[in-house]
Image (cartoon, helix red, strand yellow):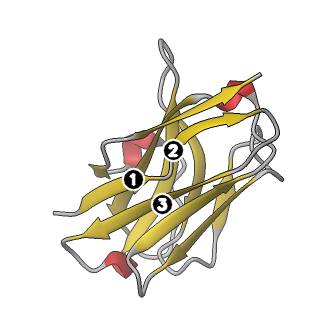
Amino acid sequence: QVQLVESGGGLVQTGGSLRLSCAASGRTFSNYAMGWFRQAPGKERDVVAAISRSGGNTYYANSVKGRFTISRDNAKNTVYLQMNSLRPEDTAVYYCGARPSTDYLYSSWREYVYWGQGTQVTVSS
């Protein structure tokens, strides 16, 4: 069992930045691939970014490439999502997910096993 707790969400103006954090506990963090996902009202949960357990491989949704950066610190059991140049369409609840892995990337929310409670990100125009 892995427990995930997201933090760092909030209200920001268009063009602003936020950094989300997801702290993990319960199992060996470095054995897990991690991902950030978001879900807007009435929409399906979509991948934002994913990172392999070593941190050596990353994946980004086309809509966030060049603006968002995913990273992880296995010594701190934490994965981050740096979000720059935020847009109103980035408004959503952001979730982090974890799944046991070798060193693969997983870009579908269906492939993840553990989830945090989510953190709201609102970008005003």
Q: Which residue is mark 2?
A: 9
**Direction bottom: furthest residue:** 75
Q: Which mark is residue 6?
A: 1
Asked whether, in this view, residue 3 is left or right of residue 33, the answer is left
Q: Are marks 1 and 3 in contact (CB under 8 Å)?
A: yes
Numbered disc total: 3
State the residue in front, 21 or 3: 21
Q: With 13 as the anchor, is 6 left or right in this view?
A: left
Q: Position of residue 12 (x, y in %)?
A: 67, 37
Local packing at callout 1 (Cα closer than 10 Å; few below 14, some 14-19, many 20+) is many
Along the horizontal axis of the image, is 77 left or right of 62? left
For the residues labelled 1 and 2, say whether their Cβ atoms are less than 8 Å apart: yes
On the picture, is 70 further left or further right than 93? Answer: right
Which residue is label 3 attached to?
21
Q: Tag 3: Cα neighbours inside 10 Å, few (<14), some, or many (≥20)? A: many
Image point 47% across, 75% down: which residue?
A: 53
**Amino acid type indicated by mark 2:** Gly
Secondary structure under tag 3 reads strand
Seen from the viewer's position, the closer of residues 102 and 31 is 31
Label 1, label 3: how far apart the Cα atoms are: 6 Å
Q: Secondary structure at mark 2?
A: loop
- Judging from the image, what secondary structure is the residue with disc 1 in? strand
The Cα atoms of the two marked residues, 2 and 3, are separated by 9 Å
- Image quadrant where residue 1 sits: bottom left
Q: Position of residue 72 (x, y in %)?
A: 53, 73
Q: Is residue 123 above or below residue 61?
A: above
Earlier residue among tags 2 and 3: 2
Marks 1 and 2, how far apart at CA: 8 Å
